Image (cartoon, rainbow, N blue to C red):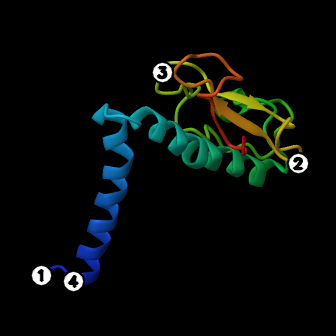
Amino acid sequence: MRPSLTFWVLLAIIGFILYALVVPRIGGGPGAREAATHSDIRGGIKSAIDQFKRDNGNYPKSLQDLVQRPADAKNWHGSYLGSTNLPIDPWGNPYIYAYPGKHNTKSYDLSSAGEDGKPGTDDDICNWTK
């Protein structure tokens, strides 16, 4: 029995998604770390934060709440990040999270200090418009 066209289309989509996630992290080309950081901030970490909010009715107070159950989280279904480790950016620094956000006052701020490792500089990557 031969696989259907739907199977091959689905396989191609999954392959493309994996390629898009893996190549920036191992490629090392210009912008690879920045692309991986954008992917974390707009993708994986954002999804974990959003799922925490859906489950518990509010945003986490810290990223630690995504990997370790806070005392006031009645419907915690973590680890929301798939491990007990807090995420670090491609430069080896922890992501910076604030709730409520200074820039996103109705939600949260999530950022990376970028290559220089110093928050508040031009190379920061964040979930708000600079």
| Residue that badge 4 annotates | 4
Residue drawn at x 78%, y 37% as measured from the top left: 60
Q: Earlier in the sequence, mark 3 or mark 2?
A: 3
SS at mark 4 in the image: loop
Rendered image quadrant of residue 99: top right
- Horizontally, residue 123 falls left or right of residue 22, namely right
What is the distance, in whole Å, between disc 2 and disc 4 at their CAs? 46 Å
Query: Residue 108 placed where, x, y %?
Result: 79, 41
What is the distance, in whole Å, between disc 3 and disc 2 at their CAs? 29 Å
Rendered view: 11 above or below 116: below
Nearest the viewer among 22 and 128 is 128
Q: Earlier in the sequence, mark 3 or mark 1?
A: 1
- Outermost residue on the left side: it is 1
Rendered view: 26 above or below 21: above
| Residue that badge 2 annotates | 106
Given contact means CB atoms under 8 Å apart, are the residues at marks 4 and 1 in contact? Answer: yes
| Residue that badge 3 annotates | 91
Q: Earlier in the sequence, mark 4 or mark 3?
A: 4
Q: Earlier in the sequence, mark 2 or mark 4?
A: 4
Amino acid type at image mark 1: Arg
